[in-house]
Each structure stands twice: as C-alpha cells, then as structure tokens.
Image (spheres, coloured by chain):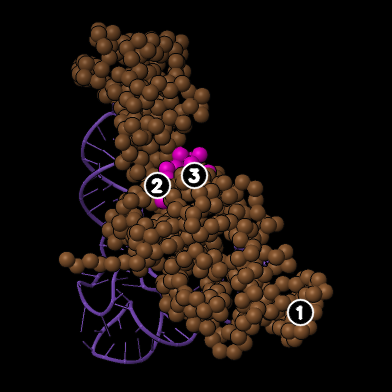
Chain colours: A brown, B purple
Amino acid sequence: MFILSVKPARTRFAPSPTGHLHLGGARTALYAYLLAKKTGGQFLLRIEDTDVSRTVPGAEQEIFDGLRWLGLNYDEGPDIGGPYGPYRQTERREIYHKYIDILVKSGHAYPCFCTPERLDAVRQEQQKLKVNPHYDGTCRALSQDEAARRIANGEKHVVRFKMAQEGVTVAHDHLRGDITLENKQLNDQVLLKTDGLPTYHLAAMVDDHEMGITHVVRGSEWLGTFPLHVNIVRAFGWEEPTWVHLSVFLKPSGKGKLSKRDSVDANKDGYSVFIKDMQDLGFTPEGVLNWGALMGWGVPEGDVMNLEQMVERFSIDSLTPSPAAINFQKLDHFNATHIRLFTTEDLAARLKPYFTREGLNVNDDTLLKIVPLIRERLVTLDDCLAFGAFFFKEDVNPNPEDLIAKGLDAKQSAQIAQRAYQILEEQPTISHERCEPPLRAYVEESGLNANQVFGILRVATTGQKVSPPLFESMEIIGREKCLARIKNAIEVLEKI
RNA sequence: GCCCCCAUCGUCUAGUGGCCCAGGACGAAGCCCUCUCAAGGCUUAAACCGGGAUUCGAAUUCCCGUGGGGGCACCA
C-alpha cells in the first residue's frame, strides 16, 4: 500500500487585542485552522499585545468567544495553555530580550538613542526633500564602547535591526512566488521599544520560531515588511516557515479596503463585518464561515460546506492572491442554505433565543412543530419572528384592511369568513387533512379563487398577509384559537 | 514621492499553451410549480483591462502601459 505522507502543519492565528474580531481576521484564522487540521497538525492562538497603549479591554475575550462561536477551536492558547506558552506576548519579555542579545552580539542589531522628536524632524525633512522616509543611521555609526557607555549611563534607547544596505532580498511567498526587494528600500526597523517590549517584527519572528510554526498564514498587509521578516529569521539562522500572504477584503463596491466604517454602513442594512454582531443579526457560524471561505479560495467542487467538509477539501495551493470585494447577498445565500441543512431539533434550539429575546413565551413542542414550516423561509435566524411570532401570541390583531380579499369588499369578505367559520366548526379537530378538502370544495362552488378565501383566513388566523402554509399553521394554532380569531375577524369586517 | 502586490461575467471563482465560440456559484431576467411568502425545477443574458512579443496555436509565457490594492511608525 502506498501512503501519501504530509507533514503535520503547526499554524497560528495571532491577532492584537485592539478592537472587534472581524471578518478578515476570522477568515485568516479559518485558513490557518484548515491547514492545520487537514495535515493533522495543530492550530494555536497567540495574542499580540505588545502595543500596550492600543490594547482594548475585553477585546481578547471577544477573540476567544468569536473563534469558539465559529467552531475554530485552537489547540493551544492564552486561556487554555499549552506546551509552548505563554501565549500572550506581554508575558514573554525575557524571551525577546534573550534573542535581542543574540542579535546585538552577532552584529545584526544595535542600540539607538535617538528621541522620537528627532526622528520626527528627520522624517519631515526627508519628506520635504522628497526622499524616502528612513532612519538616517546616526546610532548605527556609534562605536560599541560609546553605546555601552550611554547604556550604562541609563540613557533610554531602542534596539534596531541592522539591515544590509546593498544587494537584494528574495523572499518566497507561497501564493506569489519570489518577491525581490532592494535592501536599501528596507529601514533599520526598531525591534525593541523603549518600554522594553518588542515590536511585531521581532516578537512574531521569535514566537513563530519558538512555537514551531511551520506555515505563517497572515494578511497581505504584511507583504511590505515581508522581506524584513525574512532577514530577521535569516539573521538568527533559523529555518524559514512557509509564508502564505492572504488576499485582502475590499468594500462591497470593490473600492478600497474593508474598514470599520463599512460595518457602520452595513449595519443599516442588517449586516456587519464584526463576528460578534453577526450572531445578533441572525447569521450562523456555518453561513459566515462558508461565505468567508470562498473569498480567496477556489474550491475544487461543492460550494456549500461545513467546517468538516472544508477541512477535507482544503489546500493552500488553491488559495488566490487577488483582493476580493465582499458581497453580503452571498452571505444571505449561504446562511439560508445552511439553515435548511440543520436538523429540526438543532434549528429549534438555535431559533429559541431569537423568540425569547422578544419576550415571547416559547413552548418547545410548538417550536418543534413550526420549524419545518418556516425553515425554508428563513434567511437569517431572526427571520423566525416575522414568520412565526404569532404562534406564541395569545391574540393577533390583523389590520382590518388586510382582511378584505382582493377584488371584494368588506361585506363580501365577512360572508366568506362566516362560511369558512361554519365549515371549520363542523370539524372535530383542525388539521391540514380535514380542513383543506371542504374549504377547497367551497372555493369551487362559490366561484371564488383560492387566494381570496385562503387569504382572508390567513390574515384572520395569523394576523399577517405573509405566513407559513395556512392549514399547517392553523393546525398548530389549534381549533379554539382559530375559531376565536376568525370570529374576531368577522366582527372587525362587519364594523367597516 | 518611492517600493511591493494583484488583474477572467456586476461579485466570488475554475482555467497552469490546443479539451475554452471560457465552466460553476451569488445576483439579475423569464417560465413551471403554487393558498401568501419562500423553497424547488428549467431556461436566458453576462467576462479573458489595453498594446506589443514568443509560438503552428495564448485567458494561460514575456515586456510595456493602464487600473486597483497594500506598505513606507518606538502600530500591529
């Protein structure tokens, strides 16, 4: 037997806790997760909180909750631990200092005493002269003795990477191939800040190495500093991971990168790019994931997938590098499609919170009965209110106008309701099988059309013009309530 | 300003030199079904950014434009 062996991949999702978990982050996490699971490896979560001033309280928890809601369970992370912890960068200071020392000793990095004010002035001057903004190298020229003396003096300083000033760097991205950049385009970037914490450039490289990450899956906004990162990894003499820079998401219009502002706009139409909001809006993890997965991934076949199926079909070779405009209509489609795939019990459980949050008293047996009736009518879970809230209400108060059938007047409509009432009253129970035949017969003999007769009954019993199928609905509402509601409708019609 | 990346229907994508007068999905239009609304079935319209080059042959390779995106911090 022939065994195709794939090395298990270790991947990570490494967000900074500076805001809401959004669609772009979720998709990055998804691909990293899929790659790990596909190859039998591990997926881990690391919090990149080295910019203390930007850290938002609660953001970290939102990341945990969001990933769990989506079903992207990580094997290692800040809240569950793991063999390579800690998984929060602010708790890893000593590790970074150890590696900074290595770089300084090997001549790949140097201390810099320039003040932010001076740097600002230099940058402004360079812009005025239309030169590329870059560090001017003042401290790079300092002798080791001089630097040591100033450090001993307690002078505040950062540590910069000593970038080669000539030649080129060739960095290999899995989706784009070799990317070549002249070294002089690269800056002597700050690796360690005055506050003793590392910048992303150092922290991410160190952690990915320490944590055994085999594939770095991240957004294409990192493409610009990608060659720098490759240089840092090489300065340490480490083996490079496989780099996978994902495409970015564009606004629905295709003009510009998706931003927070777009979520505000989207919210007006019942959408959001924040994972937390999507749940409130009635989207399902399955729908959101399926939608996000398809933007940037050319699935071989079968567009509709749950997480498990995505794992089966996933391959980083079929990821696409070009930017993708998001399309909320497609979200609707995938959400509705997955809703239709849920079992009745599952869907009932998912729907219940949407009824109860509106203050409705949900009877579980009734809920189970209405699910098959409304399932294919739902786009979002909260649509269940529009189609099924009346099942849990004591009274319905139809708009009198709506009770009048098309082409008829109030009096005629009242007569029809009266006749329908008699027919239904003759039935010992109200069921689909018992009620439809006699009412159809009435439609026949009266010369009316089904729309007219059924329409009056629909509005009378459900209180709305659009509802799940009439007879099935009446059956669930029950004989007593149906008759009472029709009687009420007759009264309303007679008063017109 | 400089650098990097990307480029197939409106949108997401398939396509790795002949299988492509370009396939799928969403959306759109029409028809069927039908007690409303959906769902479902069938059908239609809709694209290789432009120009050169290589080749018997190019959506597919190369070059130049153009358009779009991203980056140029003691932010990630």
Residue A435 in sight here: yes
The one nearer the camera, A154 or A312, is: A154
Q: Quadrant of the N terminus of chain A?
A: bottom left
Q: Which mark is residue A148?
A: 1
- Residue linked to disc 2: A287
Who is closer to the viewer here, A419 or A21?
A21
Name the outermost residue toward the right: A153
Chain designation of label 1: A
Q: Is A87 situated above or below A169?
A: above
Residue B60 location, x and y as percent?
Answer: 33, 78
Q: Give the Cα distance between marks 2 and 1.
A: 58 Å
In the depicted structure, whether residue A337 falls above or below residue A215: above
- What's under tag 3, amino acid-wise? Met
Could you confirm whether marks 1 and 3 are on the same chain?
yes
Is B7 or A127 nearer to us in this picture?
A127
Indicate which label's residue lies in the foreground, 1 or 3: 1
The answer to if A95 sits in the magenta stretch is no
Marks 2 and 1 in Cβ contact (< 8 Å): no
Q: Assess whether mark 3 and mark 1 are in contact (beta carbons under 8 angstroms).
A: no
The kind of secondary structure the magenta stretch mainly shows is helix
Q: Which label belongs to residue A278?
A: 3
Start and end of the magenta stretch?
A277-289
